[in-house]
Image (cartoon, rainbow, N blue to C red):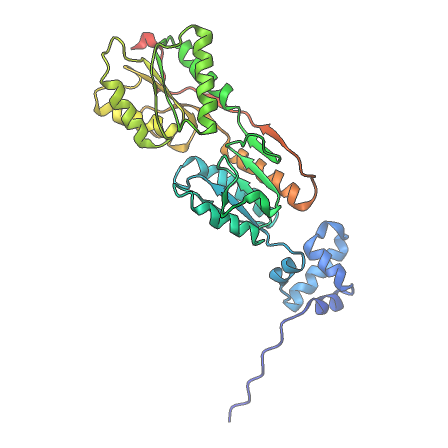
Amino acid sequence: MRSPRRPPSPPAKIADVARLAGVSVATVSRALATPEVVSETTRERVLAAVRETGYTPNIAARNLRARKSMMVLVVVPDISNSFFADVLRGIDEALAAENYGLIIANLGRAPEQEARYVNLALAGQVDGVLLLCGHVPCGGGRRMTDANLPIVAACETIPGADFPQVEVDNRAAAKTAVQHLIGLGHRRIAYLSGPRANVLDQARAAGYAEALAEAGLTGLAPVLDGDFGFHAGTKAAETLAALPAETRPTALFAANDEMAIGFIKAARGLGLAVPDDMSVIGFDGIDYADFCEPTLATIHQPRRTLGARAADLLIGLMSGRDKPHAGIERVATELRARASAAPLAAR
C-alpha cells in the first residue's frame, strides 16, 4: 500500500527570511532592494536566510506597490536601419544595470503606429520614454508628453524640447568630412542628402555647405535627394555616372553610411571605380563600413555611448536623482579616413 503523498510545502515568505536572519521584514526588504543601505554583515545574514528558505521575491508585487513597471519605452524611427543596433545595445546595457527592461516602439513607415505607443505610455505601462525619432509621438489627439513621464531624446534632437537630449554635433562633423575631401584635392564634391525635413540631414547639409563656402567651392557639384536607404545610393550612382566625365564630381559626401555603401556597390556596376573615379565618404560609422570594398571613409558616431548616456539621463529622472531639465549634451565624433576617399592626384 502506497504511503499518502505529502502536500508540497508552501513557498517561503519574507517573514520566514526575517525570522531566520534575526532581523525585521523591513530590513530584509532593504537588503534585497537596496543592499547598499544595510551593513555587509546584515546583508550576508539575509542572503544566507534567503538561500536556506528558498525565498523568491515577488518582483511584480513589489513594482505594483511602488507604482513602477520597471520598463522603458524606446521609440525608434526604423528598426531596419542598422545604425540603431548599437544605440539600442548601449541603452539596454545601461537599463539592465538598474533592473529596467525595454519595449522597442518601431515607427517604421507607418505614422499611425504612434497612437498605439502614446496609449501605452498614457496607460502607465512604462516608467519613462527614450525618443530616437526626432519628434514627440502623438495620436488620437494626445501627445507622448501628456503621460507626464520622464523623457530623454537621443540621436535626433527635437527643437524646443523641455527635456534632456543627447546628440553629436552633426553640422561640425559633416563639415569635417567635406574638409577631408577638400584636403585630398577635390573641388567638385556632391552631396547625397537624407530626407530634407529630417533634422539630421538639415544639420549635415549645413555643414557640407559651410565647408564648401569657406573654400570658395559652392555650386560646383549637385546635391542629390536621398532617404538614408541603400537604394538612394544606387540611384545617386546612376545619376552621376550619366554625367560627362569632365564635369562629373570627383567626390561624394553621403549623409549616412547606408547610402554611401549603396553608391559604391552600384558605381562598380556602372563603370565608376571608387576611389579612382570618385572618392566617397559617409556618416555614422556602421559596422558594414569596415567590410565593404573599398572600406568606407566615414564620420564615426559612438552609437553605444549615445544610447548609454541617454539611458543614464533617463534613469536619473525616473529615480528622482535628477530634477527635470532641458538641454542638449553632445558626444564627440571621429573622422575615420579609409580607402574609399583618396587624393585627387592618385586618380
**Residue 103 seen in this snapshot:** no
Q: Nearer the viewer, residue 176 or 39?
A: 176
Res 262 quadrant in image:
top left
Q: Is residue 295 above or below residue 315?
A: above
Q: Is residue 56 above or below residue 310?
A: below
Query: Where residue 305 sits: x, y (%)?
Result: 54, 34
Which residue appears at 53% of the width and 37% of the height?
307
In the image, residue 18 sits, relative to residue 144, either above or below, namely below
Residue 219 place in picture, x, y as percent: 37, 10
**Residue 197 drawn at (x, y percent):** 43, 28
Q: Residue furthest front?
A: 141
What number of labels is visible? 0
Left or right, 5 with respect to 65, comes to left
The quarter of the displayed image where residue 51 is located: bottom right
Side of 130 relative to 344 (left or right): right
- Residue 154, x across and y down, in percent: 53, 35
For residue 25, side relative to residue 89 (left or right): right
Please state, as top left, top right, bottom left or bottom right, where the C terminus lies in the image: top left
Occupied quadrant, residue 277: top left
Camera-nearest residue between 277 and 152: 152
Residue in the picture at 29% in, 23% down: 236
Q: Give the residue furthest to the top.
A: 216
Nearer to me, 146 or 22: 146
Residue 175 seen by the camera: yes
Residue at screen point 55% across, 85% down: 5
